Amino acid sequence: MIYLQLFLAFAQIGLFSFGGGYAAVPLIQSQIVEIHHWMKMDQFADLITIAEMTPGPIAINCATFVGQQVAGVPGAILCTLGYVAPPVLVALFLIRLYMKYRNLRVVQGMITGLRPAIVAMIASAALSLLVLAVFDSSLAQLQITDFHAVEAVIFVVSLVLLRKFKVHPIAVIFGSGLVGT
């Protein structure tokens, strides 16, 4: 039964996470922390950190890690397949439709309308990760008493280094890790 739950949970995430891996983060959080209770919020924060640091797409790394934690290697395989299979099938179908109808005004309007929604999903994921890192809680359970000043300073310094001084992201990751220890 757990194998089916894992597969279906990540199939839902894969099917509805438009905009890529970061857009999937709130959906992953909802499934594994709030709905199925496979992890606590602090474990989820560690999951995101590990998934971001390892090579590959963040959502696939999350799926593999959650599957491994909950049900071992078979769980890891099922979660990864559950996340990957629906978007691949939908993409193949949509590519076929797009190639056939790409010049229609309604198709162009749909694509234009999806852009802001995808940006909003990515911004939502970024805000969730920021709150999780700085307050060690979800946005719904935010309490000012949970504020972590060191993490907030690391965030601001990292942002400045990346945006203003164009420091390589790998250097920022390693530096942040060193400061955080």
Image (cartoon, rainbow, N blue to C red):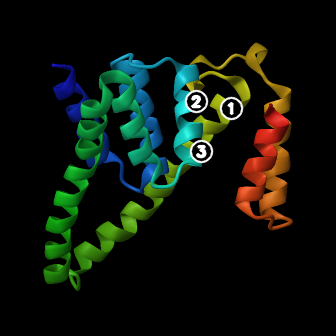
- Which residue lies at the image location 18% right of the left edge and 81% below the top edge? 99
Residue of label 2: 45
- Which residue lies at the image location 58% right of the left edge and 35% below the top edge? 128
User: What quarter of the picture does the C terminus occupy?
Assistant: top right
Residue 161 percent coordinates (x, y): 84, 58
Mark 3 vs mark 1: give the one in front.
1
Nearest the viewer among 107 and 26 is: 26
Residue 175 percent coordinates (x, y): 81, 48
> Sequence-wise, which precedes: disc 3 or disc 1?
3
**Vertical comparison of 150 with 61: above or below:** above
Residue of label 1: 133
Nearest the viewer among 142 and 42 is: 42
For disc 3, the neighbor class at 10 Å (few under 14, some 14 to 19, many from 20) is: some
Question: Within the image, what quadrant is residue 145 found in?
Answer: top right
User: What quarter of the picture does the N terminus occupy?
Assistant: top left
- Which residue lies at the image location 47% right of the left edge and 40% below the top edge? 25
Using residue 175 as the reference point, say whether residue 173 is left or right of it: left
Residue of label 3: 126
Residue 34 percent coordinates (x, y): 41, 20
Residue type at mark 3?
Ala
Please say if the residues under marks 1 and 2 sit with CB atoms less than 8 Å apart.
Answer: yes
Q: Measure the alpha-carbon separation of dots 1 and 2.
A: 7 Å
> Sequence-wise, which precedes: disc 2 or disc 3?
2
Q: Can residue 124 be seen in this view?
A: no
Circle 2 sits in a helix, a strand or a loop, which is it? helix
